[in-house]
Amino acid sequence: IAGITQAPTSQILAAGRRMTLRCTQDMRHNAMYWYRQDLGLGLRLIHYSNTAGTTGKGEVPDGYSVSRANTDDFPLTLASAVPSQTSVYFCASSDGLDTDTQYFGPGTRLTVL
Amino acid sequence: GQNIDQPTEMTATEGAIVQINCTYQTSGFNGLFWYQQHAGEAPTFLSYNVLDGLEEKGRFSSFLSRSKGYSYLLLKELQMKDSASYLCAVKDSNYQLIWGAGTKLIIKP
């Protein structure tokens, strides 16, 4: 693994189903983030984690949950998917030092029907 | 509220220079980032400004004026591979990134 990986790459999901998007980083970064990106809008923060064992809510947390059991993994769960959650989801991480630049995974394209 | 404004789309010619502007109104300021995002791909880091002035990195330069809430990204000697969206983001008082919607740059031969 080099950097951040996300799985699946894409998914079509029936409304009401539960779905977990996976994110793993091997850079030993302390902070991790989940964003959604929709056409015409900027990236919007869903949830974040400043360090293993802690999580926080971003701008659009409703309908999503996260956990951070260790440094490397930061899964995002949709408990009961709705069509408005159709989006591209990006996971990112940062080292929390200096500029604290965020580095992004390749994204998951999710369609909820 | 917090707001980041960028032009939606710009067109430029291969070999030319283009300036992409970004204005912001945020609760606090802890740095401004520019990212490049090719279609269907993840954003990748280009530059970071926290002090006023110009930061130059090869063909790309980024300028910041904190008093004016303004930044620009300058791309010189444009290449076809520079066709992408350019995202401006500001780190606010909570150290969270607030993102603009991005500027789609189209390069014509």
Image (tube, grey):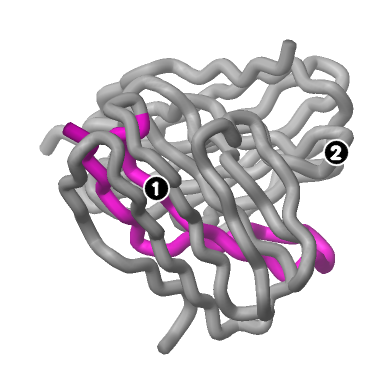
Say which mark, if any, is on residue B94. 2
Residue A97 appears at what percent x and percent y? Answer: 82, 68
Which image quarter: residue B27? top right
Dot in front, 2 or 1: 1
Q: Helix, strand, or loop for circle 1?
A: strand
Residue B67 versus residue A29 in the image, above or below: above
Residue type at mark 1? Tyr
A67 in the magenta segment: no
Say which mark, if any, is on residue A89. 1
Q: Quadrant of the N terminus of chain A?
A: bottom left
Residue furthest toward the bottom?
A1
Give left or right: position of B67 versus A77.
right
Which image quarter: residue A39? top left
Q: Nearer the viewer, residue B49 or B96?
A: B96
Q: Residues within 10 Å of mark 1 (few under 14, many from 20)?
A: many
* Magenta-highlighted residues: A85-113
Q: CA distance from mark 2 to mark 1?
A: 22 Å
Residue B53 appears at what percent x and percent y? Answer: 78, 38
Which image quarter: residue A8? bottom left
The residue at 17%/32% (across/down) is A113
The residue at 88%/28% (across/down) is B28
A110 in the magenta segment: yes
Residue A50 appears at what percent x and percent y? Answer: 77, 61
Q: Residues within 10 Å of mark 2 (few under 14, many from 20)?
A: few
Q: Helix, strand, or loop for circle 2?
A: loop
Q: Which chain is indicated by disc 2? A: B
